[in-house]
Image: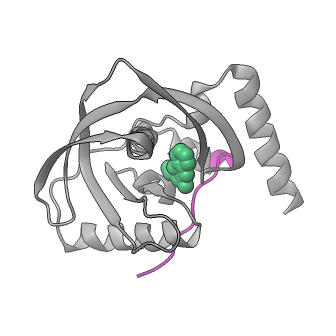
Amino acid sequence: MAIRRILTVDNAADLAVLKQVSTPVEGVDDELRALMDDMLVTMYDAPGIGLAAVQVGVPKRVIVMDLAREGEEPAPQYFVNPEILTTSEDVLPYEEGCLSVPEIFDEVERPAKVTLRYLNYKGEPVEEEAEGLYAVCIQHEMDHLEGVLFIDHLSRLKRDRAIAKVKKAARAA
Ligand code: GNR
Ligand code: NI
């Protein structure tokens, strides 16, 4: 298992990859599980609660997540070729952040409840409902699969300021 570099928006080459639409995978095999293992350790190292494959430069429709709180047992989840089947009318505003837009946090409103279908780590199909932080996070991650970042949900002014701030921090580093 290896920690991989997380692409960030301050870098033009990284941004071009983050804007790509990820492609479905053929199925879950050992090679894909090795990618998911790398993604999980990369996410824990960052640390973050979710990570899409495109954030480590692999534009495939694969997501890892762990919503366990500090002190709780780790609870990794893996999503291959996820699809959102239904979304609720009611929305949940949530202060979001993104490992590809480091140190920026702002409120995004998304459907409060979604139903989703995906393949798990074993390649088995799963259908379930998500709400609360789970709903927020899976929608944030699925946006990544479409080349969309949470700052794309903000006003142009806020988005431009966010990118300028990340670039400034990268220059200072
Ligand atoms: O670690 C993360 N935290 C987070 C907080 C609120 C809403 C979404 C997220 S996902 C983010 C990790 C990340 O960038 N995933 O793509
Ligand atoms: Ni993100």
Would residue 132 be seen by someone viewing this image from the given angle? yes
Residue displayed at 35% across by 67% down: 75
Residue displayed at 49% across by 34% down: 148
Determine which quarter of the picture holds residue 85: top left
Left or right of residue 17: residue 10: right
Residue displayed at 79% across by 32% down: 161
Residue range corresponding to the magenta coloring: 1-13
- Residue that sits furthest to the front in the current view: 71
Up the image or down, 59 lies above or below 173; here it is above
Q: Position of residue 109 (x, y in %)?
A: 52, 26
Q: Quadrant of the C terminus?
A: bottom right
- Residue that sits furthest to the top in the current view: 89
Q: Quadrant of the N terminus?
A: bottom left
- Give the colour scheme shown: one colour
Residue displayed at 58% across by 56% down: 7
| Residue 7 within the magenta-colored segment of the rendering | yes
Q: Position of residue 121 (x, y in %)?
A: 21, 65
Q: Position of residue 94 (x, y in %)?
A: 56, 36
| Residue 85 within the magenta-colored segment of the rendering | no
- Residue that sits furthest to the left in the current view: 124
Up the image or down, 80 lies above or below 75; here it is above
Q: Main secondary structure of the magenta part?
A: loop
Left or right of residue 101: residue 2: left
